Amino acid sequence: MKKVLTLFLAALLWAGLAGCTAGSAAPSPTSSQRPASPSAGVEYPSQTKVGFLLPGDPAEDRFSGVADKAAQEIKATYGYSVKVETASTDEAISAAAQAMAEEGFAIIYGHGGQCAAPFAALCEQYPDTWFVTVGGDQVKDNLFPITMCAEEGAYLAGVLAGLTTESGILGVSRSADYPAINKTTNGFILGAKSVNPQVEILETVLDGPDGEAAYAAVQEQLSAGADVIFSNTNEAQPSALQAVQENGKARAFGMLGNYTEYAPEQLIGNVLCDYVEAYRQATEAIMAGTITESAPMFMTTGNGCVNFYWNDAVKAQLSTEAVQAVEDTFLAIKSGEIQVPNEFEQVQISF
């Protein structure tokens, strides 16, 4: 089957490297472009207020939990007054953000692209407040997205999949169809085809992070001959990995979380984003007044925000050539020789 995936092209990806194992190098300062300062004369006292709007309960939702952890880290590191609220609908996001802006919050973070539209409709009324989303594509004088470049780690997973598949068939699934998630499966496919151009891709797009659907999709892919699975299906990943474990032979990757426990003998490694570090870098850039240009703030392997963590038990079973390919790929990304398309870029992938 041949299929064409398209994303919107804006610019070439700024890319870099921190490391390829759990002992990766310390992050270096970000050098990506940042949005223009909304009000250059504003001073931020020690009691600066910083708000976080989360889509779910941080005690129950892993994605929301990392934002809550970042909030507490910023409070401890900088002494700022931090407020964390749950707001999952447009109405709730708008109401909470406006209340914070009225109280003079210096920064209001929206944890997820769902905050982009509500923030865009509100931010111009409060020019001395920064509105920042994790994900999303809205950019205004005092609004920009933090862009986690998880596609870089997905590309690496694809390289490993292309080198280790015995059947020549890879199973790929994602929980939705929009640029910020499509870029990860695109990156995986590009990585696989960079070392194995003839590899066959079986792709499934779900209607959401449904565990039963994710499990069924992987089962179908395994039945069709896939022996390496990449399931970027958010909280449905444990179900997808259950199918891998039941298969007993296939291998897989975890995406945006440590999922090793669900297939400890078959999961090669996990692609992880350090949201705490991303929030720290964004906060520091805003408060230091170093922001100079309106654009997304890219968080990459190069500034310590995206990494690949091996499952050492499976790594030990791989060939030295495959492991070396990982090292070489990271170096190529760092040098800019390999540029993995993000959600602002356009790429056509045929498979």
Image (spheres, rainbow, N blue to C red):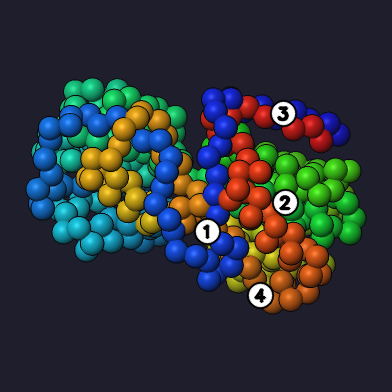
Pointer 2: what residue? Answer: 158
In three-dimensional space, the C-alpha distance between marks 4 and 1, rounded to whole angstroms, equals: 19 Å
Asked if marks 3 and 2 touch (Cβ < 8 Å), the reply is: no
In three-dimensional space, the C-alpha distance between marks 3 and 2, rounded to whole angstroms, equals: 17 Å
- Tell me where residue 284 appears, x and y as whole percent: 27, 49
Mark 2 element type: helix
| Above or below for 304 versus 117 | below
In three-dimensional space, the C-alpha distance between marks 2 and 4, rounded to whole angstroms, equals: 18 Å
In three-dimensional space, the C-alpha distance between marks 1 and 2, rounded to whole angstroms, equals: 18 Å
Pointer 1: what residue? Answer: 18
In this rendering, the label closer to the viewer, 4 or 1: 1
Say whether residue 2 is left or right of residue 287: right
- Tell me where residue 244 appears, x and y as whole percent: 74, 62
In the rendered image, is residue 117 in sight?
no
Q: Residue at x 71, y 71 (%)?
A: 315
In this rendering, the label closer to the viewer, 1 or 3: 1
Mark 1 element type: loop
- Tell me where residue 61 appears, x and y as whole percent: 42, 56
Amino acid type, callout 4:
Asp
- Comes first in the chain, label 4 or label 1: 1
Pointer 3: what residue? Answer: 348
State the quadrant of the C terminus.
top right
Q: Residue at x 19, y 53 (%)?
A: 82
In the rendered image, is residue 28 in sight?
yes
Q: Residue at x 80, y 65 (%)?
A: 321
Say whether residue 174 is left or right of residue 98: right
- Comes first in the chain, label 1 or label 2: 1
Pointer 4: what residue? Answer: 312
Quadrant hosting residue 151:
top right
